[in-house]
Every structure is written in structure tokens, then in C-alpha cells.
Image (cartoon, grey):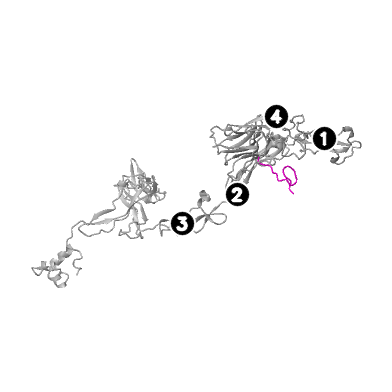
Amino acid sequence: QSIGCDDYLGSDKVIDKCGICGGDNTACKVVSGVFKHTLTNLGYHKIVEIPEGATKINITEMSKSNNYLALRSRSGRSIINGNWAIDRPGRYEGGGTMFTYKRPNEISSTAGESFLADGPTNEVLDVYMIHQQPNPGIHYEYIIPGDNVISPQLLAHRRPGEPLNGQLGMPETTNHEDEDLHRETDTLTGQSAGTFPVIQPRRFPSHQPENQVPAVQPPRQNREYNWKQIGKTECTTTCGKGSQYPVFHCVNRVTHEEVSDSYCDSSTKPIPEEEACNLFPCPAFWDIGEWSECSKTCGLGMQHRQILCRQMYANRTLTVQQYRCHHLEKPETTSTCQLKICSEWQIRTEWTSCSVPCGVGQRTRDVKCVSNLGDIVDDEECNMKLRPNDIENCDMGPCAKSWFLTEWSDRCSAECGDGVRTRSVVCMTNQVSSLPLEGCGNNRPSETTSCNNGPCAGKVEWFAGAWTQCSTECGSGTQQREVICVRKTEGNFDVLNPYECSYLEKPPSQQSCYLKPCGSKWFHTEWSTCSKSCEGGFRVREVRCLSDDMTASTQCDPQLKPEEKEPCNTQDCIPEIDENCKDKYYNCNVVVQARLCVYTYYKTACCASCTRVANRQPGFLGRR
């Protein structure tokens, strides 16, 4: 058979939510609510007051946040997270009960902090929130005794027949001077929750209740056995102030020999009083907090934890100066972490062929973000800064078709005598397919042409004149100078044949020059063949703007752009006069109107008329 909460075999009594053995849950009151006030100032803000005698205490943050819960007694003693110091999750004693402080730390968890305690409390406690971000809401709940209910902690653990603090029974009436009357205020509504007596240990009336019969004690000298202290229990702690109790056994009064406790009167057995022991402080130790979330969701990251030097005394763990833990190696506060292997970029195909057979085109390849399991995932799961290119330009070489030329330079390379003028010539792709142009071929147009600015005056012996101006205003050109063999005479110079100075090193008469970059310039092809031989046709050429490195440019002056089309062969068409081509009949106009000129007979008989019509209407003679 089972044992009930009243310690009777076969009893089916259980403790209700009020802590009453065999109770019906009507002897207490549940106080609950949600603190949802909007807070503006950072720091400690009071949430709720937990009254004396409260049980089943539950203070829970409704969702995860950067705020912290704090707990302290009405006397001002910090129990959890006081004085701006955040304690690690664990068990903390306060208000006569043990509080369990929880702070979920899993990455996937959205649960907030919580305080849990069974109670009952022996003093008023205040719950605070250390406000750092918007309040997600704090749910609080606890149970307080109802009106005129004896505190359950004195009844629930008393064995049948066991005296209650030295009394054989519970008095029906008590002296009001020995009662603690407290009034609980509902923190949610602010209304009174009534008064209830709390019977404290060792505070029952000293007189016997009127309805109880005192137990008859045998005369002391007639008792053969009595209770004797034979030792003490083991100290609850090895350091930092623990507790122990005296141990009483029944012994023979004469021989002091231990006998069964049944020989002694149980009602006279002394109640063991708690005694302090091992008062010296415990050695300080490193209190290791939980690791923070990993700084990265994949790949190598960092995580941190709080390391505090703490020391235990009087069943409380206190934070002390770190030098007290110098005898111990300090644990690491940071560590590497890796939740999973990051996805990575993979090149799935080789480059495709260039999109053009010549010139500049593009080529592509397939680049995918692949997880560590080999699955193709969204590009956002890979580091976009490390993504390989999946498209790039490709140069298949020039598609040459035509020669492009600049205009001749304005300056002659020599100030006097023979010199040269220059122009730039480049073979480039012809982009206008309708032009009647052929490929560049081997007939490269000349880049220089001769020029003469008149005869030069007499000079001196191997005498080098001044360099001429550069043949081009920009880009690469040439400079010329006169080099002659002269003989100096009195007040005059005689020009000699060059062989007279052959034993001397002749200075160079030409050198390259470069004044400045040309920048962009207009290039054009040669004119095409005229579209008609008479009566006005047209011819075309292609014009391009090219930079110094012969690439397409948009920096040329539009006003200086050479013409791309011009008229040609504007003269009238004059038919050749053939003395033998005459009309042999007076009515040849009828032959023309009847379109009979296509026949050889009429074409000969009316030669002049048919020829005149053929020149006005090309192809007339060829239609039938």
C-alpha cells in the first residue's frame, strides 16, 4: 500500500497547490499578471513585489531580449543581478527559499529569462528588470495563503503524533500577541487580498490549550532510560559556514549503554538545534559562464563567456577580486566555433566560345553556390565578394577590312628645301557592310608625301642647320635639318662638295619627334567608286574616331568630322555620235512608241531614235 502525504499507510491524501496535505486548493490565492509597461530610461525598473509567504513563484520574460531580471530583498540585499553585475544562471538563496535563475542561450531558442522558486518566502522580495531594449513583457505568478490559514510549511511535514514545536496538538485559539498578521496587496489590481495568520516556528503559546490533556510524565528518578547526546551530524559543508545538529540516543541511566529508542519517552526527546560549523571561507574558484552564440552562422567564428572569481560563504556565492583566484589557471574567455561548414562557389562548366568570330565579344560559364552536402542553394548563402566571374570579354583579334587614314599634316618637315608631310594609316574593321570596299590587302597607303618651302640660303662647313618643326602637331613625326659641307672664307662661306668633308662624321639630317599625345582623331577610308558615271552620282567612305591606341573613342570634335558621303560625276550624259546611226524612216517615233527597238531590224532602221531612248531609260533595250 502507498503512503499518503499525511504519512499514513493506505492514505490517498496528496498535497494541493496551496501546499496543504489533503487540501482542496481553496486555502490559497493565485496572483498573476503581465508587466507590459513601456520604459524609456535605461537601468533598474521595479516590476512586481513578492509578498512574505508566497509559494510557487514564477517570473518569466515572455520572449528573448537583451534585458535582464533582477531580485533583491526589501532590506536592500541583492540576490540576483544586483549592482550592475550579471550573475550566471544557477540556484540562489534568498527570502528563505531557493531561486533557480534560467537564461536560455541556444541560438534557436526564443525563450526569455526566468526566476522559479517553490517558497514559501520569509520576507518581501522585489523583482526588477534591467531595461536595455523594448520590454517584451514579463509574466509573474505566485500563490499566497488565503484568509485564516495556518502556514502549510508547519503542517505538511509533521508526522502523525509528532509534537509541533514542543506541543502535542494545534491550538484552536492563539494569543494575538504571538500571531503575525500580514496584509498582502495584489500588485496587479492594487486591492487588498485580506489578512492571514502566519504561525512562525517556536512562536506558539507557551500555555497548554484548554481542550488538550497534558501528557503524564513519570517521575525522573523512576525512569531507567533517558536521552543523551552522543555526537553531531556531519557538517553540511566542508568550508564557508555549514550547519550540523546534535544526535540524541536512548541510553541506560546507570551504565550509559545505548539501547533502542523505544525504551525512552519520545515526547521528552530534545529537539536538535542547528549549529554553525566550518566557519572558515572556502577557497575562491573560477565561475565559468555559458558560451555566447557563435559570431558566425557558418564557418569559423568566435564565442565568448564570462569568467568570474567567486567564493562561497554562508551558503551564498559571492563575486570577489580576481587576485583571490590567482592560485588557479584562468579558463579561456574566448574560443573558436563552427556551427556548420559554409556553402562555397563551384565553377560547373568551362568557358563557352567567344560570341564573335573576330573583334571583342563575350564568353560565359556556369557558377553555382553549393552546400557542404553538394546541393545547389541560393547565391545568398555564399560569400558574394568571392563569387567567380561568370561572364567576361574576349578579344578574337581585329576583323580588318579597310584602310583608315587621317588628313595630311599641315606642316612640312623642312623650313626650306625638300621635306615631308605625314598622316596616320591603320587597317580596321569595316562596320558598314553596304560600302563597296575591299580588304586592306598589301597596298598600304603612303604615310608620307614630299613638300618644299623654297630654296635655303647658304650655310657653313659640315654645317647642320636648325631642326625643322615636327612634321605632326601631335603623336609621332619627323624633323629635318640641312647638313652641308662649307668652307669659311674671309667674310664669306663657300659651299663644297660633300666628299670634301667625307673624313668627318656627318651629323644626322633627320630624327623622330613627339610633341604631345594626339588624343582622339578622325580617321576615314578612301572614297568608294561613284555610283553613276554621269548626271550625278555619289560616293561614300567610312569615318571613325580613334584614340592614340587606335581604339574607338567619342572624344573627337564633331565639327571637324570628315564627310562620309559626297556627290560625284555631276556632268550630263553625252551620247557618242555615230555617223552611221541615222533614222531611215520619217515615222520612227511610232517604232519607239510601239517598243519595237528591241528587234534588230527596227533598231537599225531607226538607229538614232532607238539610241536616244536607250540613253534616257537604262535597260530599255533589254526588256521584252
Task: Say what amino acid the circle numbered 2 marks.
Answer: Leu
Residue position for label 2: 339
Percent of width and height locating residue 111:
59, 43
- Examine the image and state in which quarter residue 134 appears: top right
Number of other residues with Cα within 10 Å of mark 3, as a class: few under 14, some 14 to 19, many 20 or more: some
For the residues labelled 3 and 1, the Cα–Cα distance comes to: 100 Å
Q: Is residue 9 magenta?
A: yes
Percent of width and height locating residue 48:
60, 34
* Residue drawn at 49 percent across, 59 percent down: 350
Residue 268's label in the rendered image is 1
For the residues labelled 4 and 2, the Cα–Cα distance comes to: 60 Å
- Examine the image and state in which quarter residue 585 appears: bottom left
Name the main secondary structure of what is drawn in magenta: loop
- Examine the image and state in which quarter residue 597 appears: bottom left
Q: Is residue 156 magenta?
A: no
Secondary structure at numbered mark 1: helix
Horizontal side of residue 160 vs 196, given as left or right: right
Number of other residues with Cα within 10 Å of mark 1, as a class: few under 14, some 14 to 19, many 20 or more: few
- Check if mark 2's residue and mark 1's residue have beta carbons within 8 Å: no
Viewer-closest of 589 and 35: 35
Q: Which residues are magenta?
A: 1-17
Task: Say what amino acid the circle numbered 3 marks.
Answer: Thr
Residue position for label 4: 179
